[in-house]
Image (cartoon, rainbow, N blue to C red):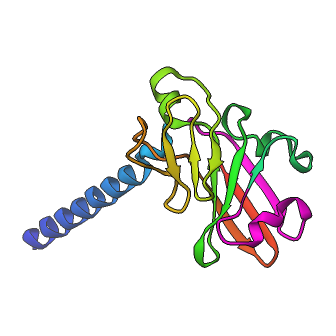
């Protein structure tokens, strides 16, 4: 009888250990956390003329605190704003406009801009980021970390962008 109780206790202990390990791993920060977290939460009407570029593949728009009077919840880190990008197959992405490389190296808040339709580039370190692949840096620049990604969901003609 004692052996069964010991085995049951070991099984419980093993389960608790595995549960804690997964819990700790889920809280671990990834490379997307180079740019500090800021509160982002806004909903865009895709039929709004201001966002017409998002109706075509590889279209993009800049959103900031002045857009539709959304204020700080659309400002991104350092008030640099957010790039909203229409990827292939109806997917949408939202990226902070702050260059992760310049922030990591010198804590400077440098604003990137969209170039060549599917790329964004930092004017300081010259890193180019592929907007179709989660803002991954290309090998032609100094940056190694991808752009900070914000969550996006689309329901009908409304897109919700958030991070909190």
Is 25 left, or right, of 59 in this rendering?
left
Q: Nearer the viewer, residue 25 or 115?
A: 115
Q: Position of residue 77 (x, y in %)?
A: 66, 36
Residue at the (58%, 58%) spot, across then down: 118
Would you say residue 46 sits in the magenta stretch? yes
Q: Position of residue 91 (x, y in %)?
A: 62, 72
Q: Nearer the viewer, residue 146 or 27?
A: 146
Q: Quadrant of the N terminus?
A: bottom left
Q: Position of residue 6 (x, y in %)?
A: 13, 65
Q: Against 114, is 142 above or below?
A: above
* Any part of residue 29 in sight: no
Q: Hey, which quadrant is residue 142 in on the image?
A: top left
Q: Position of residue 104 (x, y in %)?
A: 47, 29
Q: Nearer the viewer, residue 29 or 129?
A: 129
Residue that extends furthest to the top in the rendered view of this protein: 106
Would you say residue 92 sits in the magenta stretch? no
The residue segment tinted magenta is: 35-60
Q: Hey, which quadrant is residue 162 in on the image?
A: bottom right
Residue at the (43%, 42%) spot, across then down: 145
């Amino acid at each position: 009888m004692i052996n069964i109780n010991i085995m049951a206790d070991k099984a419980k202990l093993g389960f608790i250990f595995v549960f804690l390990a997964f819990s700790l791993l889920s809280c671990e920060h990834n490379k997307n956390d180079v740019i500090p977290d800021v509160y982002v939460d806004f909903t865009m009407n895709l039929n709004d003329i201001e966002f017409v570029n998002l109706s075509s593949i590889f279209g993009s728009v800049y959103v900031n605190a002045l857009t539709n009077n959304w204020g700080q919840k659309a400002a991104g880190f350092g008030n640099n704003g957010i790039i909203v990008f229409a990827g292939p197959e109806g997917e949408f992405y939202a990226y902070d406009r702050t260059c992760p490389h310049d922030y990591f190296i010198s804590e400077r808040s440098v604003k990137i801009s969209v170039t060549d339709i599917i790329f964004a580039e930092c004017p300081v370190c010259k890193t180019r980021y592929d907007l179709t692949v989660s803002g991954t840096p290309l090998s032609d620049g100094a940056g190694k970390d991808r752009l900070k990604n914000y969550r996006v969901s689309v329901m009908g003609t409304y897109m919700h962008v958030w991070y909190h």
